[in-house]
Image: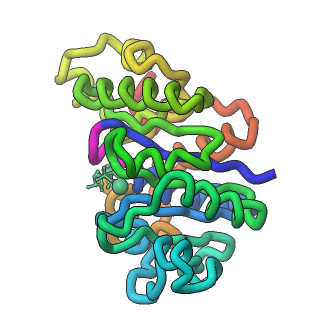
Amino acid sequence: MSRVIVLASGKGGTGKSTVTVGLAVQLVKLNKRVLLVDCDSGMRGLDLMLGVENELVYDVSDAVEGGCDTEAAIYSAQNMYGLYLMPAPLSAEDEVSPSVMKELIDSVKSNYDYVLIDSPAGTGSGFDAAAAAADMALIVVNPEPTSVRGAVNIRMKLSKLKKDDARLVINRFSLKRFRSLGVYKDLDHVIDACQTQLIAVVPEDMQIASVAQRGEAGKAQPKSAVTFKNLALRLEGENVPVAKKILGIK
Ligand SMILES: Nc1ncnc2c1ncn2[C@@H]1O[C@H](COP(=O)(O)OP(=O)(O)OP(=O)(O)O)[C@@H](O)[C@H]1O
Ligand SMILES: [Mg+2]
């Protein structure tokens, strides 16, 4: 059975798109078929991260408005057999409604093991559309109070939508920065503040940013990508410990 997962954060720029792509690559390496759905209408970025930006002709809005067959709006990622992308509309005006987005994803999900939906920041209509078809949410947070507040808001919104299967991904963790900020005593305090069970901690790592921004997520593998691999394995039900060495935690 396919799993449909929305990646969300109240605050912008926590790393939703980067985590979406990093996780997708590792799921594909586990021989899963993965569809990424970019729901960030007007601000799409997954096509760049997968290196397929020059191939795009159709997007989600064409598929729902009858401008093309649904399959024509789904693109194969370069260098990654088993990874697919349905891009968001270029213009925010073409944002698709939650009910239509749910219908679209429901109609294609059986072709994939995982559908990962990258949402825009915040709790507005774009998030509603991204969350509509999801049966699980990964809330991406950076370990600082403004981001944690966003995570709490998203959790409340998910509750209202009766989507209570949510897990926390702490992204851009740097022990040095965490200690220098001096807000939280340890990661348990961040998790408690977010009121959401932890599923992964991803380090602050320029290489993670670099492979994604250069459209090479399917090619190069930074060492810290093991944290995405562990996340993929946990979604598959395996009990994998946090990669403490990578995070600098003893
Ligand atoms: N683990 C990481 N280490 C270092 N940089 C990271 C990491 N994750 C994300 N970044 C960087 O953080 C910035 C925001 O990442 P990204 O675009 O994935 O966030 P987002 O939550 O999707 O943003 P938006 O809300 O605008 O959609 C980018 O510059 C990205 O390269
Ligand atoms: Mg994004």
Task: List x then y, in percent, for residue 195.
Answer: 46, 17
* Magenta segment main secondary structure: loop
Residue at the (52%, 39%) spot, across then down: 138
Q: Is residue 140 above or below residue 69?
A: above
In the rendered view, does 39 fall on the left or right side of 66? left
Q: Quadrant of residue 136?
A: top right
Above/below status of 155 relative to 92: above
One can see residue 211 in this view: no
Would residue 10 appear left or right of 249 to someone viewing this image?
left
Which percent across, then down, holds residue 171?
Answer: 39, 39
| Viewer-nearest residue: 188 or 2 | 2
Res. 57 image quadrant: bottom left
Verify whether residue 111 appears in magenta.
no
| Residue 166 x/y as whole percent | 56, 31
Q: Residue at x 33, y 46 (%)?
A: 121
Q: Quadrant of residue 163?
A: top right
Front residue (pair 141, 133): 133
Span of residues in magenta: 11-15
Q: Please provide percent x and percent y for residue 89.
A: 39, 71
Residue drawn at the location 66% of the way across and 76% of the way down: 81
Residue 190 visible in rendering: yes
Between residue 244 and residue 210, name the one nearer to us.
210
What residue is shown at x 52% (from left), y 54% (from top)?
117
> Is residue 14 shown in magenta?
yes
Note whether 93 is above or below 174 in the view shown. Answer: below
- Nearer to me, 241 or 132: 132
